[in-house]
Image: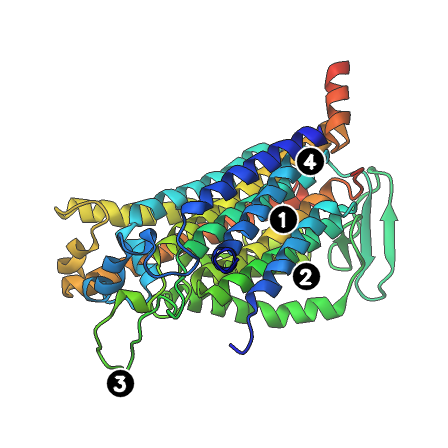
Amino acid sequence: MGWQIDPVVLTLVVFCAVGSLAIKDLLGAAIVFGAYSFMMCVLWAVMGAVDVAFTEASVGAGVSTVFMVAAVFRTTRRSKD
Amino acid sequence: MDQLMAVIAGKYNYWVYITLMMIGLYGMIAKNNLVKKIIGMSIFQTAIILFYVSLGFKHGATIPILRHGHGATQAAVRAVDYINPLPHVLMLTAIVVGVGTLGVALALAILIYKRYQTLEEDEILEKTLEE
Amino acid sequence: MRIIALVLVLLCGGLLIAGTVEFAPWGSPHARQQVYLSPYFIEHSMEDTSVPNIVTAVLADYRGYDTMYETAVIFTAGMACFFLLRCLKRMEPQERVYRHLVTGMVLHVKKPSVPKPPEGLFEEIDPLWTPYDIIIKTLGRFLIPPIQVFGLYVIAHGHHSPGGGFQGGVILGASVILLALCYDLRSEVERLRESLSGICSAAGVFIYAGVGALCLALGSNFLDYSALAPILRVDPVAARSLGIFFVEVGVGLAVMATMVAIYNNLASAGLYDQGL
């Protein structure tokens, strides 16, 4: 590895977490949550936990985001905070 | 000063993971919307999994899959060459249980919306007080 | 409320950071957690089970009891979604939308008393969802079989590469969810019926516990796969490897069926008439 990717991905993870809690549109929050899951997967792959990264990629960035979008579709997209 | 820098360089990873956990905890307590609370719960869960998986990391070690196949030498396996696999095993369980919990939480949110026509916590409390 | 939350969060965070004072620096191979149990697993898993992927060996063999209960938890989550959301009482929908297959003309029927148009000429589409798109349907038709083959590969190759039962099961479930997204929920439910997915998720847990009970019936401990050696006619080390494989198949089946069941219940809010 030429340069350390760890601090960059860590900052992205924190920004995605804060962003998904701050966005008022619930569909946008669900999509940013999917991006947060994917950044976690990259972090674990860099750390060498390949099984955990594979599981998080399929579960978090795949199925979990679809569940959230389905629930937002069935309830409402607006939120007050 | 040098010693402080060494301590920070060795431990700043743990501090960032704790910050992430606290972001998730704040989202669960302070946000009014139910879906935001569920997102906070999920952030908290993945941050804890990140903390555990990072406990098993060793500098200069490789992934916990042994070399095998045709022509691979049967060298003695030293534990210091491989990353600790035990946290990975426990966290695999945790991730899948987390997605199951997420599904049930979203089902509860859909039921609450069907009953009260809103997802904001203060409006739901008002409506339950009116009944 | 926010001030209380902020104070609480800062307090918890401060306590946790104060707790990291005793930790060894990140990544050191001499920390207390690296020397206790994992050197045994790393050094002896190949000669005990002949599975190169240490994580799979520990997950399904050394810690197989935890994994069995985790499969049961997944099954329980799927059942909880079913019990919470499913309305079995069929209500006739108020407005229906039909499309003529040849010309693409759309009929919007508002009164429930108007009879259904003939089946071969018209198809029913969802009132709430986006119109017909041929690109997504064709892409879905091409993508879904390779995804399923890849899911089966991931389950079978859990011994030699990152993967295993959970990952393969989730990929298989995601392929069925992709079918529901490209076409519509009704055609997906026709292909993988609700009763079949319920039976599959229970069958997965049953396979796992059944392998353990078989080992018990053959005279050894529960989930001790080396007792299967006389039945499979291999030596005990290879019997452990095959036992891990059977158990992973059970886990994959349970996880796939549960993901599909949770998606169906969430996307249609229990009514199973239209979804995402």
Q: Which residue is drawn at 52% across and 36% down?
A: C80
Q: How far apart are marks 2 and 3 (CA)?
A: 46 Å
Look at mark 2 in the image and give the residue it sits on.
Answer: C182
Asked if labels 3 and 4 share a chain, the reply is: yes
Pinpoint the chain carrying mark 2.
Answer: C
Image coords of residue C115 (percent x, y): 81, 43
Look at mark 4 in the image and give the residue it sits on.
Answer: B34
Q: Residue at x 79, y 56 (%)?
A: C130
Asked if labels 4 and 1 share a chain, the reply is: no
Pinpoint the chain carrying mark 3.
Answer: B
Circle 2: is it few (<14), some (14-19), or many (20+) Cα within 10 Å?
many
> Which of labels 3 and 1 is toward the front?
3
Which image quadrant for residue A8? Answer: bottom right
- Say which label, 3 or 4, has the lower sequence index: 4
Q: Distance between the residues labelled 3 and 1?
A: 46 Å
> Which of labels 4 and 1 is toward the front?
4
- The answer to whether mark 2 and mark 4 are in CB contact below 8 A is no
Question: Element at badge 3?
Answer: loop
| Nearer to the camera, C239 or C1 | C1
Kind of residue sitting beneath label 1: Phe
Look at mark 3 in the image and give the residue it sits on.
Answer: B71
The N terminus of chain C - image quarter: top right
Establish if A77 lies above or below C252.
above
> Which of labels 1 and 2 is toward the front?
1
Look at mark 1 in the image and give the residue it sits on.
Answer: A67
Question: Element at badge 2?
Answer: helix
Q: Which residue is drawn at 28% across and 55% down?
A: C35
Asked if labels 3 and 1 share a chain, the reply is: no
| Nearer to the camera, B11 or A13 | B11
- The answer to whether mark 4 and mark 1 are in CB contact below 8 A is no
